[in-house]
Image: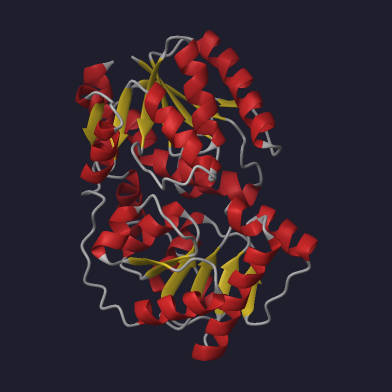
Amino acid sequence: MKIAIMLGTRPEIIKMSPIIRECEQLQLEYFILHTGQHYSYSMDRVFFEQLELPQPHYNLNVGSGSHAEQTGRILMGTDQVLLKEQPDVVLVEGDTNTVLGGALAAAKLHIKVGHVEAGLRSYDRLMPEEINRVLTDHCADVLFAPTEQAQQILLKEGIPSEKIFVTGNTIVDVVHHASLSEKHTRVLEDLGLEKREYFLATLHRQENVDDSYRFHDILRGLDALNKKYDLPVIYPVHPRSQKKLEEFQLDAPGVTLVDPMDFLGFLELEQNARVVLTDSGGVQEETCVLGTPCVTLRANTERQETLAVGSNLLAGTMPESIVECTSVMCANKKTWGNPFGDGTAGKQIVRILREMV
């Protein structure tokens, strides 16, 4: 069996890492196809280094562009690689343009598609990620659902039960692996922070940062938190978000803007924050696993499990709601359980592939 592992963004590198390590350990035939959707050192190569992953065998270097341009370049580049390599299965993870482009290229060549983190739904079709994950689920041959809830969503959409496997989420594997690492990060010391004495914010979703009014409202909410609690609000700025900040001439005096973080540094910031405020799906999962309260700066989430266990609240983007929800989560006793599995998802996924393909 030959496995093609596709990735293109920071979350995909992180969440595919347990599968790559398992392939390495079992000495399976596989190759990594990187689309280059994220293409800077801070958003890409540093994650390979910290997670001790082999360098990609292929890099399409698609870069930025409209959704159509980016997906089209991924589709064309992937098609050429797959024709050359002839893998038995293509593994994609999540909901990016890399996922959709890779899945479509494989399906059209009659190569099996395995979708890691299948069955997530926000039910908001205005989100490009929602379109990507729905279409990928429905052209996949093997669907790795992170939770029972995700499995039920897939079944209700008519996907045959024999295609669906509940494995847990590979982010648990990653956090466990990183927690055991002897590598030391000095991010708290470098930023002059004390444990539980700061808020951490991440903000990059198109529907938030491309809308000047919504972006402004969120920054007002973060600024209000700084004034209410007299605590730093640390915001590692995604390059695209930085561009929008400058374009819209937005400012938030109470928010400390810092460069994008490497994986271990960001994990330490998450683990030690009083509350994390985010519009990222992956960060909602990571905070849940780490035991850090989370406030989501969106009106919906595809990570419903975090709401159910009480690790997360939906605040939307209005300043008053952001402050109110953060106040609630500041008082959270952090007694929730982890709904995303036992940290063996990578092993399970590879085992299932060897049995199914």
Q: In the rendered image of this protein, does residue 225 appear above or below residue 124?
A: below
Q: Position of residue 337 (x, y in %)?
A: 20, 62
Query: Residue 65 at x, y = what percent?
Result: 71, 37
Q: Is residue 115 above or below residue 330?
A: above
Q: Looking at the image, which is closer to me, 8 or 150? A: 150
Front-most of residues 201 and 218: 218
Is residue 209 visible in this depiction of the protein?
yes
Which image quarter is the C terminus in?
A: top left
Whole-percent x, y for residue 190 in the image: 57, 75
Vertical order, 223 against 44 (above or below):
below
Image-quadrant location for residue 8? top right
Give the colour scheme of this rendering: secondary structure
Q: Which image quadrant: the N terminus?
A: top left
User: Which residue occupies 35% across, 65% down?
Assistant: 312
For the point 35% across and 49% down, which residue is it?
171
Q: Is residue 291 above or below residue 143?
A: below
Count up the numbered dots: 0
As rendered, which of 67 and 58 lies closer to the eye? Answer: 67
Please identify the quarter of the rendering in which residue 257 is found: bottom right
Residue at 25 percent across and 48 percent down: it is 343
Q: Residue at x 69, y 37 (%)?
A: 66
Where is residue 351? Give x, y as percent.
Answer: 23, 27
Residue 336: image quadrant is bottom left
Can residue 182 be seen at all in this image of the molecule?
no
